[in-house]
Structures are given as C-alpha cells and as structure tokens.
Image: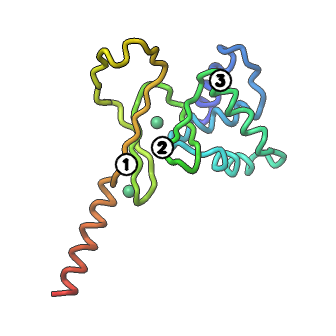
Amino acid sequence: MALIYSEKAAKMLLEKGIKPSPIRLKVLTFLLKNPTHPTADEIYQELQKEILTLSKTSVYNALSLFLRLNLVKSVNIDEKETRYDANIEEHGHFQCLSCKQIYDFFHVPRLEEKEELNDFMIKEKRYYYYGLCPECQQKEENNEKFNWNKNS
Ligand SMILES: [Zn+2]
Ligand SMILES: [Zn+2]
C-alpha cells in the first residue's frame, strides 16, 4: 500500500514539473496516506522518525510549495493551527469541539449565489462546521444519565 501512495506522490510532483526530492516525496506521501488533516508539526514529528536529519523548515517549504501548486489545501478550521489536506476535491469540514477530530463531508449545501456576488470572482469556497461527533454526543448523554442517577 505504501508503495502505491509514494508512486502517486511522485507522479503528482512530476506532473507539476517539480523534482520529487526525498523530502517532498515523504511529505506528500504522508498526506495522501493520512487523510486526518495533520498539522505541519505532526507531519514533522512523524517523518523525523524516518529521516533523522529532517528540519522543520524543509517540511514547511515542501508544504508551501504544494499549496502554491494546488497539490494540497490548507484547512484553517482550528484557528490555532493550519492543517493540510491532500484531498483537493471541494468538500466541507466538521470539527468536533470535544475530541477535536476533523471529519470530511462531501455533500456541501449549495447556497444560491445571486446578484450579491455577481461582480466577484469566486476562487474557493470553504465550509467549516463545529459541533459534537456522534461518539462524543453519546459520551455526553451517558454522563448526563450518570449525574442524574447520582442526584436522584
Ligand atoms: Zn468527538
Ligand atoms: Zn478534508
């Protein structure tokens, strides 16, 4: 499986006319393999295990190159940290406020764009939703039941 991802990464870089240097390859392969929207720091921490000489700057450089080439997208659902997504298909993100996990959703509600935006050129649309994932909702419910039982 790992081979397939790295082959795909190499192909993506070559198609953009970019030399698939080892670090670029590793970073892009990691993003393809881990669609969990990792931060630059998380990518660095993981790849450092394989490439001991890896610098944070080289990870950031690779990521900003990928962004410019539209190979990856940045996800700023978490205001504190930029996350990266190798899925560049238009989709929305839902972040659970409790466990912080980010979920993709692909059926984004289409807002009707009427006269209001007629004079604007739309280049990108972002959909960020916040709430509780099913698991965390369940946990909250159980806690409430527990507390209620205690009080009665
Ligand atoms: Zn959750
Ligand atoms: Zn995503």
| Image quadrant assignment for residue 43 | top right
Q: CA distance from mark 2 to mark 3?
A: 19 Å
**Closest to the observer: 111 or 103?**
111
Q: CA distance from mark 3 to mark 1?
A: 27 Å
Identity, as a three-letter code, of the amino acid under mark 2: Ile
Q: Residue at x 81, y 49 (%)?
A: 52
Q: Is residue 152 left or right of residue 66?
A: left
Q: Disc 3, ligand 2: is the CB inside 8 Å? A: no
Q: Circle 2 — which element?
A: loop
Identity, as a three-letter code, of the amino acid under mark 1: Tyr
Identity, as a three-letter code, of the amino acid under mark 3: Arg
- The numbered mark at residue 77 is 2
Q: Circle 1 — which element?
A: strand
Q: Position of residue 19 (x, y in %)?
A: 76, 20
- The numbered mark at residue 68 is 3
What residue did someone put label 1 on? Answer: 130
Quadrant of the rendered image holding ligand 1: bottom left
The image shows residue 108, relative to residue 139, as above or below, that is above
What is the quadrant of the C terminus in the image?
bottom left
- Tell me whether circle 2 and circle 1 mark residues in contact (CB < 8 Å): yes
* Mark closer to the chain start, 2 or 1: 2
